[in-house]
Image: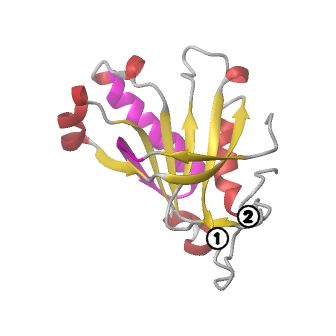
């Protein structure tokens, strides 16, 4: 993992086609992506989908690891919108402020980072973890065309301004391990 520091970004909402799996992130992340890639390949769309988005929904420390939900997603495009509604799922990437950290290397690193993200943050003054939005992984490169060591992904943790009266359970800043 190259960059131990995070930056604040704003993600815009967007419609996504998704495959949802429930269970431990270590198991559901590859399973969901395999299903989504199989669907894209079967329809001839795999080469053109662009970025991938992984949405981790649920803190395993609070709901138990077997109750976590993970969505493997790509942007919903007109050419596959009707089939996506019939055959998979459609969701909206929640927009807003995120603390993001760039990872480089095998995408398995992202899987382990997502599994540990709820317990690995250091507080940043004025911000707290927004538990109403998922943790988002943004995959920039197609592992079929780029060597594992050169793959890039961002881990994006939803943040909001801290309300000092609420005493948040998890505050977010640097995503350093």
Residue 1's label in the rendered image is none
Query: Which of pointers 2 and 1 indicates the residue nearer the eye?
Result: 2
Residue 119's label in the rendered image is 2
* Mark 2 in CB contact with mark 1 (< 8 angstroms): yes
Q: Residue at x 57, y 66 (%)?
A: 130
Which of 45/15 is in front? Answer: 15
Which of 97/53 is in front? Answer: 97
Q: Is residue 12 left or right of residue 130?
A: left
Question: Of marks 2 and 1, which one's residue comes earlier in the chain?
Answer: 1
Q: Residue at x 49, y 40 (%)?
A: 53
Q: Position of residue 12 (x, y in %)?
A: 45, 45
Q: Which residue is mark 1?
A: 61
Q: Position of residue 50 (x, y in %)?
A: 45, 25
Q: Is residue 107 visible?
A: no
Report the Cα–Cα distance between label 2 and label 1. 9 Å
- Label 2: which secondary element: helix
Residue at the extreme top:
145
Residues drawn in magenta: 13-41
Q: Is residue 106 visible?
A: yes
Position above or below: 102 against 171: above
């Amino acid at each position: 993992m190259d960059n131990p520091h995070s930056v604040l970004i704003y993600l815009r909402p967007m419609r996504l086609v998704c495959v949802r799996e429930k269970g431990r992130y270590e198991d559901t992340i590859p399973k969901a992506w395999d299903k989504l890639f199989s669907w894209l390949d079967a329809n001839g769309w795999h080469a053109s989908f662009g970025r991938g988005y992984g949405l981790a929904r649920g803190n395993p420390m609070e709901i138990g690891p077997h109750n976590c939900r993970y969505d493997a997603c790509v942007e919903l495009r007109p050419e596959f919108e009707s089939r996506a509604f019939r055959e998979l799922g459609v969701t909206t990437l929640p927009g807003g402020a995120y603390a993001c950290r760039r990872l480089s290397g095998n995408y398995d690193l992202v899987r382990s980072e997502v599994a540990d993200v709820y317990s690995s943050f250091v507080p940043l003054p004025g911000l707290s973890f927004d538990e109403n939005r998922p943790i988002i992984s943004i995959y920039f490169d197609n592992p079929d065309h780029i060597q594992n060591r050169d793959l890039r992904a961002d881990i994006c943790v939803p943040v909001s301004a801290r309300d000092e009266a609420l005493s948040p359970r998890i505050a977010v800043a640097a995503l350093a391990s």
